């Protein structure tokens, strides 16, 4: 399965690391566009110069780890599309251009299921996707969660528990499953 990852699931870090950890297990092929990565970088600027620099570094690492994930938009696709928020049309266009099976987003209202279905796409919430993958591969997703937790503890200098960390990252179902 190919899944286009919207900016809102790439940034924040914990959600991105959980999704890409699942992708690294072979559960799906992640896709994104240059514009999606640019939105992430612009959002991180709000954290100041350090946030912008960190986003640039993380995006460079992402591109190196997933060199075939970045989708180029096909000519003419964007102009024929409509969504409630015209600023999200590029996301749908990238999903179509990348021959994605699904679009992973937190922005449910901006991507009506009926419009995605017309394009052969399924809308997936990140928590829904991770929980469904956990049902198929409990050990694999547990390993991903453990790695993400260890990294969060190391980087934050705190002692997070799995459930609290994933709930804070807006992943309550997978949080409960992995706790």
Image: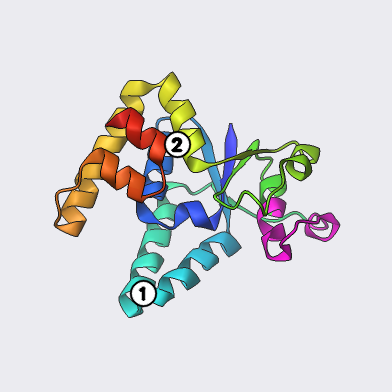
Which image quarter is the C terminus in? top left
Separation of marks 1 and 2 at Cα, in angstroms = 28 Å
In the image, which is nearer the foreground, mark 1 or mark 2? 1
Q: Is residue 82 magenta?
A: yes
Quadrant position of residue 44 = bottom left
Nearest to the observer: residue 148 or residue 60: 148
SS type, badge 2: helix
Residue 56, percent from left and from top: 40, 67
The N terminus is located in which quarter? Answer: top right
Residue, x 72% and y 53% (percent of image)?
93
Q: Secondary structure at mark 1?
A: helix
Residue drawn at the location 41% of the way across and 61% of the way down:
60
Tell me, yes or no, whether the two marked residues, 1 and 2, touch with CB atoms within 8 Å: no
Among the two numbered marks 1 and 2 on one chain, the one whose residue lies closer to the N terminus: 2
Q: What residue span does the magenta drawing correspond to?
A: 75-93
Q: Disc 2 designates what residue?
A: 23
Residue 10 left/right relative to 57 = right
Rendered location of residue 113, percent (x, y) = 72, 41
Image position of 90 with respect to 144: above or below:
below
């Amino acid at each position: 399965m190919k899944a286009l990852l919207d900016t809102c699931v790439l940034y924040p870090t914990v959600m991105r690391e959980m999704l890409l950890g699942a992708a690294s297990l072979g559960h799906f092929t992640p896709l994104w566009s240059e514009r999606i990565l640019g939105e992430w970088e612009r959002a991180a600027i709000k954290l100041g110069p350090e946030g912008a620099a960190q986003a640039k570094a993380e995006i460079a690492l992402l591109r190196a780890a997933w060199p075939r994930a970045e989708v180029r938009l096909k000519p003419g696709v964007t102009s024929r599309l409509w969504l409630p928020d015209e600023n999200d049309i590029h996301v749908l266009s990238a999903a179509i251009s990348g021959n994605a099976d699904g679009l992973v987003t937190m922005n449910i209202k901006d991507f009506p299921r009926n419009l995605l279905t017309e394009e052969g796409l399924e809308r997936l919430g990140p928590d829904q996707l991770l929980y469904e993958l956990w049902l198929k591969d409990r050990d694999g997703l547990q390993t991903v969660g453990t790695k993400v937790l260890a990294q969060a503890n190391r980087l934050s200098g705190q002692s997070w528990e799995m459930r609290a960390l994933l709930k804070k990252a807006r992943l309550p179902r997978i949080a409960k499953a992995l706790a």
